[in-house]
Amino acid sequence: MPNTNALPPLWSVAGVAGPQMSRSPERLSRVSGGVTFNMAPFPRTLTPSALVGGYTTAAVVDVLARFNAAAAYVGGKCAASRPCNTYFSTLGKNLSLSDLLGWSIVFYFWKPVSRVGPVPAVGETMPALQAEMISASYQTSFAQIVVSEFSLVSDIKLAATMVHELAHVAGAPGANDDGRATAAADPGSALYKELIAAEMALKACLLPRQFNSGALGVLQDMTQGWRGRGGGIA
């Protein structure tokens, strides 16, 4: 995928590019796999953190180039697909993927800051935390999405992550902390079919090879008093 300037005009990568690149992040933390992640702006270049283990042999990632390439695929291919837009419009908010290209969306970084326990070796564990939709305002067409470095290992991986999280913005449901994700383990259950809706967007949006049958949607309150809902691949 080409590394052109392809971010939609109202999309921003916090700390890097876009009309809201200087917007301050919420004071949010998330613990996953023994690692504490804080919501933060992105650095312009990203080196895989020693805290999360050797999940990739990649060296330094140019964050803007990666987001531009992923956005080029999402905007130029996925959002140009009629089946993709039709699927999005069925998710509950009557929004197509093309509609969301016109939203104001800020992407933040799940920054690893500390860990408990030993660091896994290369290939020892699969990372759990990929990304989460932190909030969406349908009155102002604004959303916040937080992305971990696990989703920046390739352009196509980030494109798939974007589509999954945007499907949550479009209304794809998810579990919270009430045990529904565990209850949905049976792929034949109605609950599984409900919680896999965001990931199913990859099949509809020209990203079938990125589909992960275990990537159930997660929606949970991320802050006290915050009206938005968070969601993502857990």
Image (tube, rainbow, N blue to C red):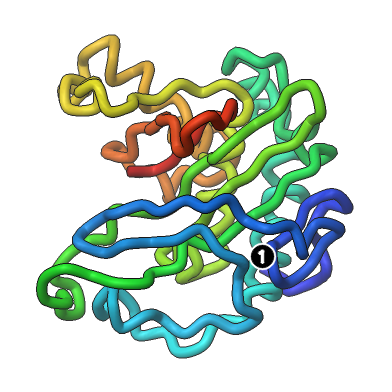
Please tell me whether mark 1 sits on a helix, a strand or a loop: helix
10 vs 229, left or right, is: right
Q: Which residue is mark 1?
A: 67
Q: Residue at x 36, y 52 (%)?
A: 30
> How many marks do you count on the picture?
1
47 over 103 or under it: above or below = below
80 vs 214, left or right, is: right
Q: Residue at x 16, y 68 (%)?
A: 116
Q: Nearer the viewer, residue 149 or 193?
A: 149
The amino acid type, in three-letter code, at marker 1 is Phe
180 over 220 or under it: above or below = above
195 vs 106, left or right, is: left
Task: Residue 92: tell me if it is visible.
Answer: yes
- Mark 1 residue crowding within 10 angstroms, few (<14) / some (14–19) / many (20+): many
**Is the N terminus in the top left, top right, bottom left or bottom right quadrant?**
bottom right
Q: Residue at x 68, y 39 (%)?
A: 143
Give the image location of residue 136, x and y in percent.
65, 31
Q: Nearer the viewer, residue 151 or 16?
A: 16
Which of the 4 image quarters holds residue 190? top left
